[in-house]
Amino acid sequence: MDIQLKRGLLDVCVLAAIKNEETYGYKIIKDLKPYLVLSESTLYTILKRLETADMLTVRTAEHGGRLRKYYCITAEGIKRIDEFKKEWNEIMAIYRFVTKEDNGNE
């Protein structure tokens, strides 16, 4: 898969994982596990990129005697998810075009 396309898909997946509630890294990985495998190093790179793009905010709080980072989506992050949904319709139209001969729809 094209690295830029995959990067964009992973960004939106992470945003979707934090869309409804503030959460932390391990829980994001656990929530995404039925859909995709994401390493901690990849996740934290994505989270930093999304934070830099103002698509999420981060706060640190103590949990079980340790500091934990909690992530919360911003209006910009919600906007990115909405843009992705619109883009996905276009991606699916391209997919149908590319695979139309495979499906016998010549």
Image (cartoon, helix red, strand yellow):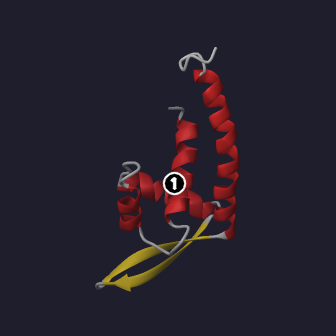
Nearest the eye: 1 or 19: 19
Image x and y of residue 72, in percent: 55, 72
Task: Name the residue at 36% across, 54% down.
Answer: 33
In this view, 96 is above or below 34 = above
Quadrant containing the C terminus is top right
| Residue 54 visible within the image | no
Task: Name the residue at 29% across, 85% down.
Answer: 65
Q: Amino acid at mark 1?
A: Cys
Sort mark 1 into few (<14), some (14-19) or many (20+) by Cα contacts within 10 Å: some
Task: Name the residue at 58% across, 60% down.
Answer: 50
Task: Name the residue at 65% across, 24% down.
Answer: 97
Image x and y of residue 71, in percent: 50, 71
In this picture, residue 103 sits left or right of residue 63: right
In this picture, residue 101 sits left or right of residue 62: right
Label 1, secondary structure: give it.
helix
Quadrant position of residue 67: bottom left
| Residue 21 visible within the image | yes
In this view, 38 is above or below 76 = above
Image x and y of residue 19, in percent: 56, 67
Q: Can you identify the residue that label 1 sits on?
A: 13
- In this rendering, the count of numbered labels is 1
Image x and y of residue 63, in percent: 34, 83
Pick out the residue farthest to the left.
64
In this view, 45 is above or below 51 = above
